[in-house]
Image (cartoon, rainbow, N blue to C red):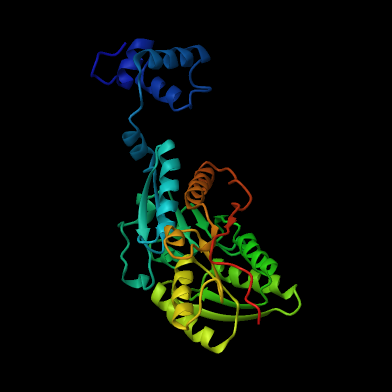
Amino acid sequence: MSRAGIRPTSRDVARSAGVSQAAVSLVLGDKWRGRVSAATAERVRQAARDLGYRPNLAARNLRLGHTRTVLLVVPALTTEFFAGVYTGATRVAAEHGFGVVLYPSPEGIGAVRDPFASAQAALDGVIASSMAADALTAIRGDQLPLVMLDSDPEGSLGAATVNLDIADGVRQVADHLLGLGHRRFLHLGADIASWTFEVRARELAARLRTVPGTTLHSARAPISIDGALAAAEAALGRHRVTAVVCDDDKLAAGAYKAVRRLGLRVPDDVSVTGIDDLALATAIDPELTTVRLDAELFGERGMRALLAVLEGGTPQAGDIPVELVVRGSTAPPAAP
């Protein structure tokens, strides 16, 4: 057995098993077949177990050219949703001896510098949100094993994709509002060119087209409360609607303010919905009907997908389910 406080080395294992250090490396690296006998391999493994030997992963990774480090590229650090994605990804990474470096890529990525002299030399792989995809070329992340989150499976740089079932979430919102009797809608969309927001607009329009007598108006805003307030106030001033479907909860909070500025009430005069189920959703009054997205599970699935890619396997198929959470911001429309 090893002496207390002293970490056994491969030389100790070799001495205990009566073999060379080269033989120990072959056995513990699982490259012994055809080079040492099965009996010798078992003797080495038993010696390692008896001594409590653990390989020096840092030295091993340097020899193999791997850092066991993954880059997570997100639009911004201040977004609650992406904080959850990071938490989920790091949880799975830690289970497999990987570290995760977070790289924010907000609009105007040209001024953001590559955090590594060479991303290819410093990283084993990249997980990136579709909203941050433009950063990949700048940091050469598109030349590494790559998993894209919230991305079109048909056009994601040839990478594996992990998606939330946003289309189903939008259908749940539409069905809920249609079931309450709403027929006049405003879609307050995010002013960002991204596949995930294109899906929201497309699915909402498609679902509403199936119900005769519905109308749908659209407005776009940056993902901020003030931006949403301005866009929603202008749109609501032009169009008489009974429901505002927002691409995310921040936009919904701005829509609340716009409704009230116009002397109307949520949900008595206008119902409002969001997507994300951020902490904000229960901080506003009335509490927001929204689609719950499991950000931590999203990060976990993204990391597991990348690990599968690194091991030459196939990531888990299927979108992550989402759930409509009905709260006080939606009600049947008032009588004309």
All told, the count of numbered labels is 0
Residue 96 seen by the camera? no
Q: Residue at 33% across / 30% down in the picture?
A: 56
Look at the image and tell me in which quarter the C terminus lies: bottom right
Q: Position of residue 158 (x, y in %)?
A: 56, 59
Q: Between residues 329 and 51, which one lies in front from this camera angle? A: 329
Q: Between residues 140 and 17, which one lies in front from this camera angle? A: 140
Q: Position of residue 124 (x, y in %)?
A: 42, 48
Q: Residue furthest left?
A: 5
Q: Between residues 104 and 284, which one lies in front from this camera angle? A: 284
Q: Residue at 58% across / 59% down in the picture?
A: 326
Quarter holding residue 238: bottom right
Residue 189 seen by the camera? yes
Q: Position of residue 170 (x, y in %)?
A: 62, 65
Q: Is residue 85 above or below residue 188?
A: above
Q: Between residues 185 and 194, which one lies in front from this camera angle? A: 185
Q: Is residue 306 above or below residue 247?
A: above
306 relative position to 199: left or right: left
Q: Residue furthest bottom?
A: 238
Q: Position of residue 39 (x, y in %)?
A: 50, 11
Quarter holding residue 328: bottom right
Q: Is residue 213 above or below residue 24?
A: below
Look at the image and tell me in which quarter the N terminus lies: top left
Quarter holding residue 112: bottom left
